[in-house]
Amino acid sequence: MFTCRLPWWRSSATCKLQQSGGFLPRAWERCQPPSHKGINTTVGQGQQVGAQEKQVLKDLEMPLARRETETLFQEQPQIGNQYLEDALLRSYLKTHLPPKVLEEVNQDLERFGNRLLTKIKPLGWECELNPPVLQQYDAWGQRVDHIVTCSAWRRMKEIAAEEGLIAEAYERRYSNWSRLHQAVKLYLFSSFSGGFNCPLAMTDGAAKVIESLGIPGSLKNAFDRLTSRDPKMFWTSGQWMTERRGGSDVANGTETVARKQPDGTYRLYGFKWFTSAADSDVTLTLARVADAAGQVKQGSSGLSLFFLKVRDEEGKLNSIQVQRLKDKLGTRQMATAELWLDGAKAELISAEGRGVASISNMLNITRIHNVIGAVASMRRMISLSREYAHRRVAFGKLLKDHPLHMQTIARMEVQMRGAFLLLMEIVRLLGLVETNMASEQDQLLLRLLIPVAKLYTGKQASAVVVEAMESFGGQGYMEDTGLPVIVRDTLVLSIWEGTTNILSLDVLRSLTKSQGQVMAVFFSTVQKKIELASSTVKLEPAVKQMQDAISSLAQFTQAAGSKGAAAMELAARDFSYTLARIYAGTLLIEHAARPDASSTDISAARRWCNQELCPVATELENSSYKAEEALVDSALVYEGSPACSSRL
């Protein structure tokens, strides 16, 4: 039986056809879309479409033997240069970048958009078709633990270096706008990268940690390699934090022990349960330093941060054993492994006991990359849905001429736009911080918005890509279209770098740590943006809705002090959603208030503000945050469960 896994919008990629474990290159024709007998839906005239449908019906009435083809009577969506086709991105850059910077960035992004279509996109699909495999033993029984990756994956690494996907942020040739330039390139790259956006996130995070430590001499070579544009020099980094007892709870879940050696280095002993991009060159990891008696300190204050090379100069693993590769729902293009550290040589790079604080810079960067991936996935699926609506005929007319169908895509577009502007705001603020141009208010706002954006866009993306998949009907569910790959790879974004609830609690910590100052900054920032847009007549309804939401949020925060910690924990998710919706809505209003704003910009801002902007206030009115409600929640969850009913 023949199997073709080629997306029908990608005729340029290699097509695998398997029969009894072999490949049949000559059977390529089976993967091609029909050259005739299909509906040419690029023409919008109703009369022509009707004639085409009559021909289809005539074909379907033919006996099976007389049909010329058994292919589907649909045309594949064709997307072009994703930079040139992204009106929102181009208008944002035009509004914010200085003219000289805009000119150079525009040229770079247009060139990169062409490279994505012609070179990177086929490589991304090849990575999906050829996932990594683990070769634990060689032909003579020697343990080698070699993670075998495909040539396309290795080429992605070279392209990442050539394009400066990490270097761009650290060269700072555009000063505070360098980080935004990098983020935009990653946004365009992400959904075509075949999963290589993940190791780039951790590489960026590792470089950020080393830079924050002042680039000590022992790490200078590593920093130069992590930020290199030379494919032969470029390194990628892992982030080995998750162990058997916990994911986000590193304080209680980390069991790895570090033993100091006479030469000042350390040997690490432990089990890393989930290590993404296990084929990386280096990694940062947490461990507990053992004292002279072999004892370690528990809790977060017992954790220290280490740098280690995965392999030695001869390519042999650094006293590391690869237990197995993870069998994941998505991101199958990337090697995720369980690793035994059996005396891995490492360098202590944080102060002893300051590992969590030191790695926080890495987490901030990887969370921003998570947002980039979420927005990119939404944009890719919406672009395909939009293009498909121009080609697919159903019930006598193109999908784009069905109002309900277009309403559905428009709603997805509004969600993506809010997420995009939230992403741009974060990287704009990060650029200011990295060039010492940020005010204290900017820094506080960035600390708040990173977890807010990560948790909200992760949930947004999951909902949008599933909705977009549905817009293709049954074709959206077919593996050989490639659409399920995008969906699977997106679903992890609400889990990576902290789940929604974990990050909601982190939002509360930012309030506590700043003693409420961060909320004062939040309110003043959104109020200023709204006031500047209040004179735009077409935005008056949106401005009014936003002002009401801000007022409701202010009332909640004033009352929150008397609610107690338990009530605030129950409110954490709704509170974080409220911050995301209000801030993203404010950015949409600000963007729509530009003198050259389009009617689409205005429509998007108004539609965003039609949703519930302050869910935390609504739930407060419904008394959802009382301590006794937690008991009711448990009863609802565990009703009828023999294992848990005794607890209630």
Image: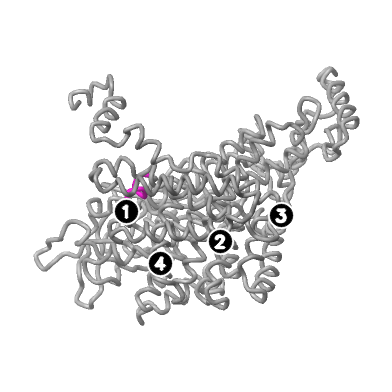
Instruction: Tell me the element at label 3.
Output: loop
Q: Amino acid at mark 2?
A: Arg
Locate the N terminus by quadrant: top right
* Residue closest to the eye, 530 or 54: 530
Q: Amino acid at mark 3?
A: Glu
| Residue 574 numbered tag | none
Decide: is 29 above or below 197: above
Mark 1 Cα shell of 10 Å, populated few (<14), some (14-19), many (≥20) = many
The magenta stretch is 501-505
Image coords of residue 151 (percent x, y): 58, 58
Q: Residue furthest left?
A: 293
Name the residue at 87% across, 27% down. 50
Mark 2 Cα shell of 10 Å, populated few (<14), some (14-19), many (≥20) = few
Q: In the figure, is residue 145 to the left or right of 350?
A: right
Which of pointers 1 and 3 indicates the residue nearer the eye? 3
Q: Look at mark 3 in the image and give the residue it sits on.
A: 85
Q: Earlier in the sequence, mark 3 or mark 4?
A: 3
Q: Look at mark 1 in the image and give the residue it sits on.
A: 272
Decide: is 538 above or below 617: below
Instruction: Tell me the element at label 4.
Output: helix
Which of pointers 4 and 2 indicates the residue nearer the eye? 4
